[in-house]
Amino acid sequence: MKVDFHYSTDFYGMNSAELGHTCMHLLCKAGEGSFVFNEHCYHIAKNDLVVIPMPDRVRNLAAHADLQVEWFAADYKFLQNLLPSNNYSIGGSISLNQDPVIRLTDEHVCHLLEDLHRLRDRMNDNHLEFYRELMGSLCLTMMYDIFEAHARREATDSHTDRTSYIVKQLMALLATGISRTERDVSYYAERLNVSPKYLSATIKRVTGHSVTSYIDRHTIPILKDYLNDERLSLTQIAELMNFTSLSYFSRYCAKHLGLSPSDYRHSLQPRYE
């Protein structure tokens, strides 16, 4: 799969239609600007970082004449696949969907500028055999630097409203690995004492993603681990993961891995010339 990477210093280019599948990382270096995201207006100034998945949702961009920014965007799924499913990235992405602006220290700004410039300087090296891996490692470094700054912001914030509580409780449930056997939205709604409709609407509103997408994101690493274990037959894996039939198990694999279970296992085998 070809992955497009984008770098620019054009503030008004951040919500281009071609970036709709990406995650945007914009650093304000000087001046001031503003934008609307999820029906809220955000103001940015020097040392502010903006992280927005699917930035085509941004509206009403406005900039002072002295505004200076640098931004980097990459395919959202590509970035998500770089991180373990039970990572800080899940909770972080939820928080950033509610407030995408992070105030950085001077130290964080220096680190992030180094990350952005490395990505800018290497993004056109797509002739390299390990281009995806190279860019993936540079993106991962950038994301962990962002997590460090974001974690500091979260340590000073407290979210006690009911919707935030529901989101956090769902993520806590999924972090236990329960999705190995439980992948139905109604199961999680019952555990959280809400209706499936309420749970789905709340998660979608707060995070921008569906409950099912979070369930799948926690399930897929478990599935891969089982498929990597040659001691387990496909029938055993289907039973361990509580699939009602082997055919349903196969369809799930094909949908989320792009291959049938047997083909996925075959792809793991070393190839000899």
Image (spheres, grey):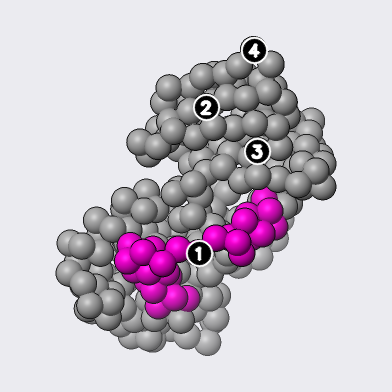
Q: Earlier in the sequence, mark 1 or mark 3?
A: 3
Q: CA distance from mark 1 to mark 3?
A: 20 Å
Indicate the secondary structure of the residue bearing disc 1: loop
Q: Which residue is mark 1?
A: 158
Q: Is residue 205 left or right of residue 139?
A: left
Q: Residue shown at 48%/28% (left/top)? A: 35
C-beta proximity under 8 Å, tags 1 and 3: no
In magenta, the rendered stretch is: 146-175
Amino acid type, callout 4: Ala
> In which quadrant will I find the N terminus?
top right
Mark 2 residue crowding within 10 angstroms, few (<14) / some (14–19) / many (20+): some
Q: Residue shown at 54%/81% (left/top)? A: 230
- Give the x, y percent position of residue 222: 48, 75
C-beta proximity under 8 Å, tags 4 and 1: no
Q: Earlier in the sequence, mark 1 or mark 2?
A: 2
Q: Residue shown at 36%/58% (left/top)? A: 213
- Give the x, y percent position of residue 74: 58, 38
Q: Which residue is mark 3?
A: 48
- Give the x, y percent position of residue 102: 61, 46
Indicate the secondary structure of the residue bearing disc 3: strand
Q: Which residue is mark 2?
A: 34
Q: CA distance from mark 3 to mark 4?
A: 17 Å
